[in-house]
Image (cartoon, rainbow, N blue to C red):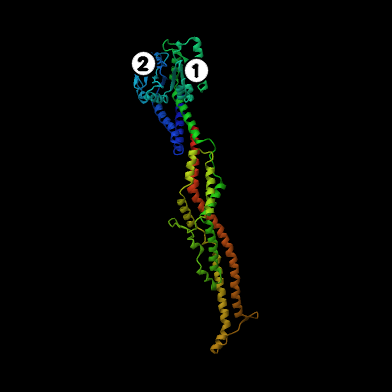
Amino acid sequence: MKAEKDTRSLASRLTALDRAIELSRGRVPDAVLAPADALIERAGQRLALAGDHTVVALAGATGSGKSSLFNAVSGTEFARPGVTRPTTSEAMAVAWGSEAPTALLDWLKVGGRHVVAPREEIPAGLVLLDLPDHDSTEAAHRITVDRLVKVVDMLVWVVDPQKYADAALHDGYLIPLAGHADLMVVALNQVDRLNPEQRHATLADLRRLLDSEGLSATPLVAVSALRGEGLGQLRELMAQAARDKEITARRFAADIAAEAATLRDALGTGPVPVLSRSDLAALHASVAEASGVPVVTEGVLNAWRHRGALATGWPLVTWLRRLKPDPLRRLRIGQGAGATDVVHASLPKATPVQRARLDASLRQVIDASVAHVPRAWAERLKAVARSDRAVLADRIDAAIGATDLRMDAGHGWWGVVTFLQWLGIAAVLIGGGWLLAPLVVAALQVPLVVPTITWQGWPVPTMLLLGGVGLGIVFGLLSRVFVEAGARVKQRQASHALTAAVGAVVDAEVIDPIRAELERLAEARAALERAR
């Protein structure tokens, strides 16, 4: 039951490691991801074939007596030691049981196979491999060793008294496999050639060396393939491995931990950056300035003044204002665009100062986003942040042109003023016409008397004339004040709306990709922690 639980736990860790790898692709060098990729593949294949078999491999250098020890442990003459051993890159296997685990050995690519009956000291299910010499001059031999070392459940490193401290073994295999210390055994062979003092000194020195390399959990056994010394202890360690149903899971768990540690170094451990609101606000403001938003807001101010003066000014003179172009229409800025009506503004290019401010704000955001981020991922962040400037500028221009500046709202009172202005003009025309009527009648010698009407002692025609003129002047002055106030409000509203529109484009084209990359990094690190 515990073995099934360990296998499920291992599967979830492999899934988490695979997720971390997928999230890291294109952001972490392939050379870092390749070993972890290979681990996931071989672990999946090995677990599918594991069954009830435990694979133990004897590995060692030329002359260590590995093949003789293989024969002595297995009780066979399957491996031919010394110079008579064929120079082949294939390993050989002895399996205890009723039949060879064909599928497993095929996957291991082990051609030579022999089946022996289980006995009391070695249970069924144990598969013992004799690997080629790891220091062989044949490259194929070394390739076979390197391949099988990564997939067997337990490794028995056979050394001899002359070369037990060989750097090729310790630096090439033992130290890199320190994470598998409890899944390895070091067997000092040929101890029959040593006297008691030499044996004690050699074992003590080898133990010290292993401990210094992080292999204190690795058992050290003194054996003699020739005299059978220590074989019982070695067989017992192998039998314990065969009875340990969790050994395969533990072996790959150690591999996962090692690969996760390597990938963790590549992903970094610092906090994932969070873009501050102040940095984003500064970027939005600098992009808006460089994109001509101040020009548009100035146009809104002048356009409201222009249109307000036309609507509320003295009708007899406002026609002169119609000769001037509307400031917003000159910028090709409308009152909004529909889904299929994309308006592009005609705005001046950014000045060098504006571009410098924009670059400084963008650089500040980029610097904040790459803090505590691994170099390869930081390069990716910089790439997505510095997107195609031409495309970005075009979309910002379109966004500005499509922004509804609400120039068609807030001027309902203009109609009332217009009506009153025309009413004043009507009074001026009636009063003036009334005053001029006697002169016209006298000049034409028409026998007509123009009536004189007064109100409170004031002639009504004069009151109409002066009242109409006064009404126009008063409403003109008051309207100018209210139009100016409305223009300022419209300018502020336009500034907010345009900055928001520009900010939305900047967020979509620059900030959102940065955040996506940072979230990807955080998710990759979280997956890696689950794998570890």
Q: Which marked residue is nearer to the observer: mark 2 or mark 1?
A: 2
Q: Is residue 264 above or below residue 70?
A: below
Few, some or many residues within 10 Å of mark 2 (<14, 14–19, 20+): few
Whichever of labels 2 and 1 marks the residue nearer the N terminus, that label is: 2
Q: In the image, what residue occupies the spot 44% across and 30% down?
A: 11
Q: Is residue 414 above or below residue 350?
A: below
Q: Which residue is mark 1?
A: 206
- In the figure, is residue 75 to the left or right of 303? left
Q: In the image, what residue occupies the spot 49% across and 63% down?
A: 330
Few, some or many residues within 10 Å of mark 1 (<14, 14–19, 20+): some
Residue lying farthest to the right in this orientation: 457
| Closer-to-camera residue (148/445) | 148
Helix, strand or loop status at disc 2: helix
The alpha-carbon separation of the residues under discs 2 and 1 comes to: 28 Å
Q: In the image, residue 406 lies at what x, y percent?
A: 52, 59
Give the amino acid at mark 1.
Answer: Leu
Q: In the image, what residue occupies the spot 45% across and 31% down?
A: 14
Q: In the image, residue 383 lies at what x, y percent?
A: 47, 44
Label placed on residue 83:
2
